[in-house]
Image (spheres, grey):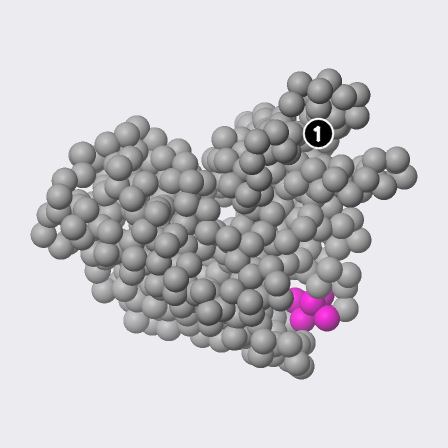
C-alpha cells in the first residue's frame, strides 16, 4: 500500500483526477442545468403559452412521439448509440470520447420531453468521456488500468452532486467495483478527489448562475419516530414487494430490448409512443399533472416527502402502475438513468401502504427509497447511505429499518431476476456504478 502511494505515476494520477474534476463538473453542470431548463420549458412555459395552467392529459403523447423521432437516428447511426441502455444499470465500462456527442444529443433531445428516465447515466457517460478525452495523446492512454481509473473518476465527479455529494459517489464506486484491500483504496482515492472537486464546482456554479440542476433531494420529510414492531412487520414485506416490482420492470425492459434489436428505429418510436400513452393514462385516471409520471422523479419525490397526505392512495397506486409500466418500456428502448424514477416508484409504493395499522409515514418513505435503490442498482450499502443522506436527521431513528429494507430488497431482487442475469449481453446487473 505505502509503496503504491509513493509511486510517481500514482501521484500523477491523483493530481490528474483533481485537475480533471473541476472542468468536467463545469461541463456537467451546464449540461444538467440546460436539460432542466428545457424540461421546464416543455412542461411549464409551453403549456402556459398555449393557455393551460398545467399540461393537459394528452400533452405526453406528442412529446414522446417527438422524443422517439429524435432518438431513433441517434441510436441507429451515431457512435455509441446514444449511450448505455438503461436496463443494464448505469452502464458498463467508461464511455469513450467519440460517443459523447450522441449521449449529449440523446439526453438533451429526449429527457426534457418526459421519457420517464433520469439524467444520472448520461451524466456519468459525459464525465467519463471528457476524462478520457483529456488522456488522448499521452503515454497514460496506453495503460488500460489508468484509462479505467481515470474514466471512473470522471464518472464519479459528474455524478457526485446529483446523488447527494462525494460520499455517496465514493461508496457507490467501492461497492460497484467489488474490489478489496489495497486495490480498492487505490481506485477509490482518485474518485474521491475528483468528486470532491466536482461537488465544489456544482455548489459554486449553482449559486453564481442561479441554474437549477434538479438533483435528488428532499426539502422536507415527514416527522420521524423510532420504528417499532409494526413498522418492521409491514415494512419488510413492503420492501420485498418493491423489489419484485422493480425486478419485474427490469424483466420487461430486457424483453423490450430484445424486441427493439430488429427494426430499431421504428420500434424505438413505437416504444416512446407507448411510454407517452402510459403517462397520459395516469393523467386521465387521476386528474393530476402528467409531469408526475413523465419526468424522472426528483421533483415529484420531494413533493411526496413534503406532503404525502396530499396524494390519495388511488393516485399513488395509479402512479406505480402507469409510471412503472412506462419506466419498464423505457428501460429497454430509450436512453437515460434508471435510478431516479425507481426511487419515486419505491417511495410511492411504500407510502400507499403507510395506512396499514402500525405503519408510520416516515418509516414507509425511508424503506421505500432504500428498497427501490437497492433493487435497481444491486448495491445495498450505497442505497442505505443514499437514503440516510436524503432523509437527513430523520434517518437516525430509521437506520435499522433502512438497513434491513436494503438487504431484503437486494436479496429478493436477485432471486426474482436471477434467471435473467445472462440475458443482458454479459453486463446484466453489473455496471461501473450500476446494478449488480
Instruction: Give whichever of 36, 297 is nearer the camera.
Output: 297
Answer with the quarter of the image where residue 305 lies. top left
Is label 1 in a helix, a strand or a loop?
Answer: helix
Task: Name the residue tied to disc 1.
Answer: 17
Residue at left offset 35%, top offset 58%:
412
Vertical comparison of 201 with 312: above or below: above
Check residue 72 for magenta coloring: yes
Residue at left offset 77%, top offset 61%:
79
Please give the range of residues in magenta: 70-76
Instruction: Give whichever of 350, 242 is nearer the camera.
Output: 242
Instruction: Give whichever of 401, 70 is nearer the camera.
Output: 401
Answer with the quarter of the image where residue 291 lies. bottom left
The image shows residue 312 at horizontal and vertical percentages of 21, 58
Residue 398 falls left or right of residue 430: left
Residue 290 in sight here: no
> Outermost residue, left direction?
357
Amino acid at each position: 500500500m505505502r509503496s503504491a502511494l509513493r509511486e510517481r505515476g500514482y501521484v500523477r494520477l491523483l493530481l490528474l483526477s483533481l485537475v480533471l474534476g473541476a472542468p468536467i463538473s463545469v461541463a456537467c453542470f451546464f449540461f444538467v442545468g440546460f436539460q432542466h431548463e428545457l424540461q421546464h420549458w416543455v412542461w411549464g412555459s409551453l403549456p402556459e403559452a398555449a393557455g393551460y395552467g398545467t399540461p393537459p392529459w394528452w400533452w405526453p403523447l406528442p412529446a414522446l412521439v417527438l422524443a422517439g423521432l429524435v432518438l431513433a437516428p441517434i441510436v441507429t447511426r451515431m457512435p455509441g448509440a446514444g449511450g448505455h441502455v438503461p436496463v443494464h444499470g448505469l452502464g458498463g465500462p467508461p464511455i469513450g470520447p467519440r460517443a459523447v456527442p450522441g449521449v449529449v444529443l440523446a439526453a438533451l433531445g429526449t429527457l426534457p420531453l418526459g421519457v420517464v428516465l433520469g439524467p444520472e447515466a448520461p451524466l456519468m457517460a459525459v464525465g467519463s468521456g471528457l476524462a478520457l478525452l483529456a488522456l488522448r495523446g499521452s503515454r497514460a492512454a496506453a495503460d488500460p488500468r489508468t484509462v479505467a481509473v481515470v474514466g471512473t473518476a470522471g464518472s464519479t465527479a459528474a455524478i457526485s452532486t446529483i446523488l447527494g455529494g462525494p460520499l455517496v459517489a465514493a461508496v457507490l464506486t467501492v461497492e460497484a467495483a467489488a474490489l478489496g484491500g489495497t486495490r480498492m483504496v487505490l481506485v477509490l482515492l482518485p474518485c474521491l478527489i475528483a468528486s470532491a472537486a466536482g461537488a465544489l464546482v456544482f455548489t459554486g456554479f449553482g449559486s453564481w448562475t442561479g441554474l437549477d440542476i434538479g438533483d435528488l433531494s428532499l426539502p422536507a420529510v415527514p416527522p420521524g419516530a423510532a420504528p417499532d414492531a409494526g413498522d418492521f412487520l409491514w415494512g419488510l414485506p413492503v420492501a420485498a414487494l418493491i423489489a419484485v416490482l422493480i425486478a419485474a420492470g427490469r424483466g420487461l425492459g430486457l424483453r423490450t430490448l430484445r424486441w427493439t434489436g430488429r427494426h430499431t428505429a421504428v420500434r424505438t418510436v413505437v416504444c416512446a409512443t407507448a411510454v407517452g400513452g402510459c403517462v397520459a393514462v395516469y393523467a386521465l385516471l387521476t386528474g393530476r399533472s402528467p409531469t408526475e409520471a413523465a419526468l424522472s422523479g426528483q421533483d415529484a419525490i420531494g413533493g411526496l416527502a413534503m406532503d404525502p397526505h396530499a396524494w390519495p392512495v388511488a393516485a399513488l397506486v395509479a402512479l406505480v402502475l402507469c409510471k412503472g409500466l412506462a419506466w419498464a418500456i423505457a428501460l429497454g428502448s430509450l436512453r437515460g438513468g434508471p435510478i431516479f424514477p425507481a426511487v419515486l416508484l419505491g417511495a410511492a409504493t411504500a407510502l400507499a401502504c403507510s395506512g396499514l395499522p402500525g405503519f408510520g409515514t416516515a418509516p414507509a418513505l425511508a424503506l421505500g427509497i432504500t428498497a427501490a435503490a437497492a433493487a435497481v442498482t444491486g448495491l445495498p450499502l450505497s442505497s442505505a447511505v443514499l437514503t440516510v443522506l436524503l432523509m437527513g436527521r430523520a434517518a437516525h431513528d430509521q437506520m435499522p429499518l433502512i438497513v434491513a429494507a436494503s438487504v431484503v430488497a437486494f436479496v429478493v431482487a436477485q432471486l426474482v431476476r436471477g434467471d435473467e442475469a445472462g440475458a443482458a449481453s454479459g453486463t446484466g446487473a453489473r455496471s461501473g456504478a450500476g446494478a449488480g
